[in-house]
Image (cartoon, rainbow, N blue to C red):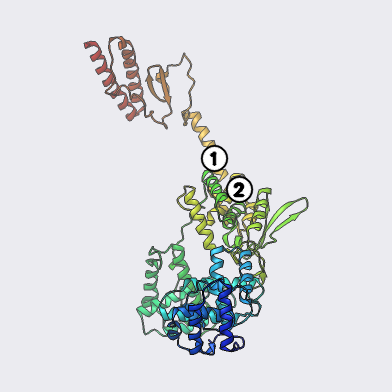
Amino acid sequence: MLPARANAPSSPDPAELLAAFAAHTERGGRSGTDALAAARQFLSRWPDPGAFALERLEQRLSVPPKMGAFITFLMTRGHLRPGYDYLIARRFKLLRQEMAGTDLARDVERFDEAAEALGFAPRTRAYMASQAAARLLIETGRRLDELCEDDVACFEAAVESARVRIGQRLHTYTACISYTRVVLYHLGVLSEPPSRLGTARQSWIQRMAGVPDELKASFVAYLERLAGIHAPQTVTARASHLAQFGRFLAEVDPDLSSLADLDRCRHIEPWLSAVSTARHHRTGEPIVVAEQKHRILAVRRMLEDVAEWGWPDVPYRRLIFASDLPRIPRPLPRYLPPEADRRLAEVLEARPQRIVADALLLQRACGLRIGELLDLELDCVHEIPGNGHWLKVPLGKLMTERMVPLDIETVALIDRIVLHRSPGLPLRHPRSGRLVEFLFTHRGRRVSQQWLRSELSEAATEAGLDHAHPHQLRHTYATALVNAGCSLQALMALLGHASAEMSLRYGRLFDQTVRENYERALAQAKASLGPVLPEAIPVHLTTDWRRAPLVKARLAGGYCLRSLAQGPCAYANICEHCPNLRSDKTFLPILRLQRVDADALLADAEERGWGVEAARHRRLIERIDTLIADADAG
């Protein structure tokens, strides 16, 4: 792609250029003897500075360093456009200083002000202005308002060519050009909103790399038709799964050229086995059962769709059955306990990245899915007279909208988010394509899901939690509502569930009926067996405590009674068996009384068939006998 340029710069008289450069160095307070000599040498070789840009890159880079000041002067005054390859390869330490007082400087300053308004940090703005904006303006010869998408695309193509040539990833240039697009859009220079950083989609052909050509054509035709009736995310996921299936077929049967030739024994069953043992391509961990099911369903649905559409290239019989799908575990919602929820909220309140921390707090306050959260629009809060504030949740996972009531604290939180969001022009909605003012914007772009996940992970670590993910905040919101007695119908409306079964997951987590039945059974157990929980048991003086239907132990100052379900206390008779216990004749009355009670308790335990309890009393009797014998001998 050739650079998009304005008209070629005029070629002033070399003497005039030399005089202007001399005046420039004098105004800068620099000794211009060496610089002027280098300028004369440059002009003697290239009287027309435009001829310098036609030299090979190696020749342009090999000029003496002393000529650098004059070359920079020519570029900033519009007399030289040295080529993107030269601008990318060279570092200009004094570029901002050399352009002072020029139209180029005024345009770069305007660009910098717009970047600051969008929330870019000073260091990032400096990189953007020098590495992208200034070089773009120099090479095109245009003013800032005259730039177009082709200009930026040419610069981007030049960076890619430089990357291939030197074999290095030019991260700084790539990021600066991407951010420059954002600033130019919000300045009104570019008409098309920028895409997210790094979200350029591969074509279907590119995604099918490694798939045999004949199968690739069938897969691509299927995906192109699917794109007309499904959301982009759905088709993209289906493409990834089909590509994995196609690459497997290329390994096990390189000669396979048609879907009609697929065989259950030779192709499908080995593939099902491979899916069950597949590992994640980045982490190396086994893929989860849900991912296994998605992969199998993608192929099954493709085969069913093309058969329903009447395509000729289809198997003659069904190859994948419902029994081939793995059963997905149904764990209970992973909510945060109240104390962990409180600690996490405190940490998020103190985090420096306010826009993402407040986004997570809003998700917890309203129980939103992460996609719904980031799709919120700037005017999402609606005040209904006499009915308070409500949050309009946009179309999400189930393609439905809903209204969620807000309290005063949450309304104040949204007001704070509005103060910290990045201003600018509306951005294009990825689903509908319409221009939308989103609530969560940063540096002229939408906040990403990955940034939210990363922020929550760091905050969870700081709060002393092992791990947390955004959907746990939704689970925590729903769990709090269930604990507060929220009805099933209200829970469905607040969470945006399409069926009662989805909301009943939280009902299973804290089922009030189960709780009531448990408490009723516990009360009956207490009435028949005595208390299951450790409580003081009133015993009348006329009652023989040694005959009570409970586990019993004699203590020095009284006795202990516990239900059979509790078992004996872990500290029962521990002192009598301690090697540090010493006794003498003064304690003989107490020891003999304890010996009598131990005999009675042993007989009672044997009568009731409590073998373990009887054995405990036997050990105690043996120990008391030893203590009495030692005391008598002393």
Where residue 236 sits: x, y (%)?
Answer: 52, 73
Q: Mark 1, residues whose alpha carbon is within 10 Å: few (<14), some, or many (≥20)?
A: few
- The extreme right residue here reads 385
| Residue sitting at x 37%, y 76% | 265
Q: Kindly state the secondary structure of the residue where label 2 is placed.
A: helix
Is residue 141 something one can see in this rendering? yes
What is the number of the mark on residue 607?
none
Whole-number angstrom distance, CA of label 2 to CA of label 1: 21 Å
Which of disc 1 and disc 2 is earlier in sequence? Answer: 2
Residue 17 shown left or right of residue 284 in the figure: right
Q: Give the mark toward the camera: 2 or 1.
A: 2
Q: Kindly state the secondary structure of the residue where label 1 is placed.
A: helix
Where residue 84 sits: x, y (%)?
Answer: 51, 81
The correct choice, above or below, for 546 with respect to 342 in the image is above
Where residue 245 sits: x, y (%)?
Answer: 42, 75
Closer to us: 272 or 49: 49
Q: Quadrant of residue 81?
A: bottom right
What is the number of the mark on residue 517?
1
- According to the image, label 2 marks what residue? 481
Where residue 398 sits: x, y (%)?
Answer: 60, 64
The three-letter amino acid code for the residue at tag 1 is: Asn
Closer to us: 104 or 166: 104
Closer to us: 338 or 273: 338
